[in-house]
Amino acid sequence: MPQEKNRRYSSPVVDGIGKSASRAMLRAVGFKDEDFQKPQVGIASTWSNLTPCNMHINRLAEESAAGADEAGGKSLIFNTITVSDGIANGTEGMKYSLVSREVIADSIETVAGCEGFDGLVAIGGCDKNMPGCLMGLARLNRPSVFVYGGTILPGENHTDIISVFEAVGAHAQGKLDLIDVKQIEETAIPGPGSCGGMYTANTMASAIEAMGMSLPGSSAQNAVSDSKIADCRAAGSAVLKLLEEDIKPSDIMTREAFENAITVVIALGGSTNAVLHLLAMASTVGVDLSLEDFTEIGKRVPVLADLRPSGHYMMSELVAIGGIQPLMKMLLERGMLQGNCLTVTGKTLAENLAEVAPYPEEQSIIHAFNNPIKADSHLRILYGNLAPTGAVAKITGKEGTHFTGRARVFHSEEEAQAKILDGQVVAGDVLVIRYEGPKGGPGMREMLSPTSAIMGRGLGSEVALITDGRFSGGSHGFVVGHITPEAAEGGPLALVEEGDTITLDAVNNRIELEVSSQELERRQQAWQPPQPKYTRGVLAKYARTVGSASKGAVTDLP
């Protein structure tokens, strides 16, 4: 292949007598004479042994590197960070979770931009590092492939991480004793892989594959499997083909591709975090995407997948019947996907799906169009005097579609969690957790601990929770997050008082505080912004630079 085109970024780093020192450094890490004439492929690994989601990714990175080398490139593996939401949830440390998405994007851009990689493979295994990887690849806009680290297998008795969180609530209600909770704790996480339901990790992996930035099948493979090893090796090779054809992320991550991603997320019953992350990814690549697009697409796309947290099955069970490819073919044949979108195979989405076989007839995980889980989207974008610029809810219908209740106001997740566990939250309450937004938290923590405690105490259909924070993909119940403007910026959420009546309507997509405009104006005049919780360090820097959740909560807007 012609080297000039394929070595656009590496040749200025290693070619010519003036770059002798650069070559000397690279010889120390294994370069031979012939390697300096090969395209350099950076392998961005999110390996870490601090979480099962990423503990196996070093092996996957080595396979991608081998694939790139076999195809005629020269691979270099580098690491970026990851954090564990499952470990940090419910603590102050969770404020770093969404922040890590920006750090990951920054670090991939920084390393690849400095070292002159011609193409990249990025391997992610947890919900923030996947969009972080895509945002880094989009900023660089060099031929790239994303690889998903794969899903975990179910724990004993069909348990997973959400089973553990909900066991805590069940213990508080007296349904489980400490021995029962410990047994679930000890057996729910059997090994490597991302959390096992259609939580944020599996949601984002599916969205990225639907968008065309992963090889077909990458999103629906077990973390420890021959298919995942083959996927990684093929990804390394695919980058060399993309280099040859000069196909870049901007050629793939188009407006139509994002619409395809939203469609698949809805059909799978995916996480509300997909709204935040897809908005951020679109912003990074320069695609005009808004909250309204989720509403419009949601009007015509049903929920078809009976997957956790609201459903019954786990991702590994969907893997066993063919993954998301047959679902995508169903959607394509129904006219719900745009098949002309380019993908990292160099082919269109329709070409990739042409030979995909349907699901086995006896399966019950993916429903037919004439028997949907829900006839339209579960992702509801709500507006009203509590959320003038939008809020995001995940309503499958099992929680009901309307809720009116009395406000219970909390200024942090910890305050709310304590009241739930000690029994002071009762039927008819609307928990208001504020000052947890991108700026106010800072960091927009997930409310997995309180939502799981609510479910564990058996209050899932009797209590609602609203917040300017966000939710884990494992959260379910009548919950509304991403309320904007956030409380720390003087949004209406900051004006709610204990005992106010709040109405949530997931049919007409409304969120209303039953207080007169005159009274709200009086409260607004009396409101004082809180002092920043952090004045130095990464959280302080994030709070100063982050934008609204309604725009994806990104930190690099002009």
Image: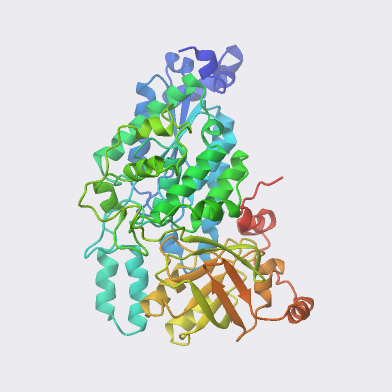
**Which residue lies at the image location 34% right of the left edge and 41% below the top edge?**
325
Count of all numbered marks drawn on residues in the image: 0
x, y percent for residue 28: 45, 25
Q: Is residue 154 above or below residue 556?
A: below
Q: Residue at x 68, y 77 (%)?
A: 495
One can see residue 280 in this view: yes
- The residue lying at 56 percent from left, 33 percent from top is 250
Query: How far across and how far down the image is residue 32, in percent?
Result: 42, 17
Nearest to the observer: residue 188 or residue 517: 517
Residue at point 35%, 27% (across, down): 67
Which residue occupies the foreground of this view, 20 or 369? 369
Q: Quadrant of the C terminus?
A: top right
Q: Is residue 136 visible?
A: no
Q: Position of residue 76 (x, y in %)?
A: 44, 30
In the picture as drawn, the residue positioned furthest to the front comes out as 370
Quadrant containing the N terminus in the rendered view? top left
Q: In front: 401, or 72?
A: 401
Query: How is the structure coloured here?
Result: rainbow
Question: For this view, does 368 lie left or right of residue 138?
Answer: left
Q: Relative to 76, is 432 above or below?
A: below
Vertical comparison of 454 with 192: above or below: below
Instruction: Give the quadrant of residue 186.
Output: bottom left
Q: Is residue 515 left or right of residue 143?
A: right
| Residue 356, position as x, y percentages in the image | 30, 36
